[in-house]
Image (cartoon, rainbow, N blue to C red):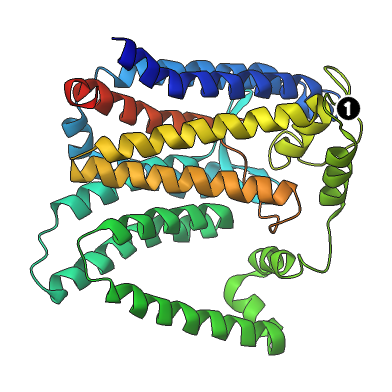
Amino acid sequence: MKTKKKYYSALFIPLLIIMIISFFNMQNAKLIKSTYELHLLKQMLWYLLGFLLIIIIQKLNLKELFKYSFILYLLSIILLALVLVFGRTINGAKAWFSLGFLTFQPSELVKFTLALYLAQVISQSKLKDKKDELKLILKTSLITFIPSLLVFLEPDTGAIIFYLLILISMLIFAPINKWWFGLLAIIFLFFLTTFIILYLFRQELLIKLIGTSFFYRVERILKFTTNSSYQLENALIVIGSAGLWGTGLNKISLYIPEAPTDFIFAFNIGNFGLLSGFLILLSYLVLDLFLIKVLKKITSKKIKLFVISFICLFLFQEVINIGMNLGLLPIIGIPLPFLSYGGSTIIIYFLFLAIILNFLKSEGANIY
């Protein structure tokens, strides 16, 4: 029993620390814009719903959940199509459903349903030769391409990166010959080279092919090394002047655009100092180690693939967001899991955790 409590504390203690720090930052976000006035209330509501989901999913049979993974995937695709017609436009992207004073982003739900369905498809595939392997690669690529195309139309290019990451992480651990990845790398380099040539010499044609919005998003990334943005400059100033304790509750030192979301790490350090930043990093490290430890215990192929995709998503968001805030990586609009404001992301990651905890419960005798 003590071992079990210690095991679960490695998940819930750092998660609760991140949650409390997030609430404090949402309180300070009220001082930035009037539109952030309800962020604290909404963030508390999303966390409450997240913990309720964990309780509910503990009562489900994982085999049944994976059995109906295609239906869940299909429903999320339908929502992606519907949001293009009935969705709310925020920051130039028609990607949200308005639910009263709350909003929901279907592209976030696809992370979960895509991971479920791909894990089911790959784990059930019987690979006898290279032809079967090619069929699996094409099938999983098509499954990933459909939602990618829909979110491209919103446009939400960040979501496409996550979908590709889910696909690639699962294929790497699938029982297929690794030379396929060499072939895929060659295809990728071909398209990348074509894109660079068009970007350098035929920008008008490139804009016609990929659209103005997507072109300027890519251009912002490509020019990252030479042009620092206003928000990045302010973020670095805030970090550099924060000291150990920051400005404290209900005070801010400098305006940072997108402070509660993309630049939450820098905003937090400005609010509560370098020590709070260290505490956040330590909390994420404990969560990462917990997930890796769980992964080592899993024998089920589909659960293993599912957890692998979540770990890759989680680590990717940590590294990219913190790197963005420190000026080390391009600014591509990726929030920090559980700390940044955003109900859709919080709920989806709680769903991932709920599946993992369900597995631990059902395999408890073997885990502990």
Q: Residue 198: image x %, image y %?
A: 63, 85
* 368 horizontally vs 124: left or right: right
* 250 horizontally vs 324: left or right: right
* 21 horizontally vs 166: left or right: right
What is the residue that sits farthest to the top in this orientation? 1
Determine the residue positioned at 56% across, 46% down: 317
Q: Residue 167: image x %, image y %?
A: 36, 57
* 282 horizontally vs 327: left or right: left
Q: Which residue is mark 1?
A: 252
Q: Vertical placement of 261 versus 248: above or below?
A: below
Seen from the viewer's position, the closer of residues 74 and 142 is: 142
* Quadrant housing residue 171: bottom left
Q: Residue 119: image x %, image y %?
A: 26, 48
Q: Amino acid at mark 1?
A: Ile
Determine the residue positioned at 21% across, 54% down: 122
Number of dots carrying numbers: 1
